[in-house]
Image: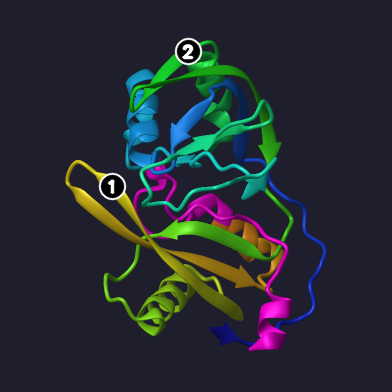
Amino acid sequence: MYWKEGDEEIEFEIPDDVVDVLFSLDCKRLPVDHAYALSTALQRVVPWIAQNDSGVGVHTIHVAGSQNGWERPAHDSGQHLILSKRTKLTVRVPKERSDELVEALEGKTLDISGYPLTVRSGKTRRLSKETTLFSRYVIGPTDDAEEVFLNWAVQTLQDLGIHVRKALCGKATLLSTPKGMLHTRSLMLADLSLGESVQLQQRGLGLHREMGCGIFVPHKGIEAVGKAT
């Protein structure tokens, strides 16, 4: 854990040059480890997602940890996520290409490792005003030590002009690809300025944003964790 008290925040308006596009979908289940399959399926329909300068981030599809007695399986269990009608497919994209993305995806049925996923209507949403952000999968050093990962994250973000005040490294997860496993860790950052929060949401951290890695979303916070520590 990295912990430093922050400064007072000033008023800040969230820009809309990068937005999330949320698509309704029809899909009953998906493999828990579906990041590569989802990314590949989307690229077949929208090839420019794979371009290095596309600015696109594909959120992996996430469901509640438990619902009606069902609990989300472990990532390496080989089991499946059970999707509800409220589950969304979310793609982070420059606003100037959001209409193009919606036009390309609406009504398309994607093959996700043998499971059909039909994309329905999409709508845009601005990035979050929250200053505590969380990424489920960040690709950093392959060293198993949390301290090595945290030091790398703090330095990399500092190079981007983002001052880390509080950071918490989470569990390690392996994402499967045809070329082998990607080693990732979750990362939570708190007490960012609004400008830093927006910048981090726009740019992400590390490689493979097309597979959901390094994409940051709002989180409730780590105050309780800090007090316990």
- Front in this rendered view, residue 31 or 126: 31
Q: Choose top left, top right, bottom left or bottom right for residue 36.
A: top left
- Front in this rendered view, residue 178 or 81: 81
Q: Quadrant of the C terminus?
A: bottom right
**Residue occupying the point 62% across, 50% down:** 65
**Residue occupying the point 62% across, 39% down:** 19
Categorize mark 2 by other alpha carbons within 10 Å: few (<14), some (14-19), many (20+). Answer: some
- Front in this rendered view, residue 141 or 80: 80
99 shown above or below 89: above
Residue span colored magenta: 201-229
Q: Position of residue 140 (x, y in %)?
A: 34, 67
Q: Position of residue 115 (x, y in %)?
A: 40, 22
| Amino acid identity at mark 1 | Ser
Direction left: furthest residue: 179
127 shown above or below 158: above
Residue denoted by label 2: 108
Direction top: furthest residue: 107
Q: Is residue 62 magenta?
A: no
Residue denoted by label 1: 176
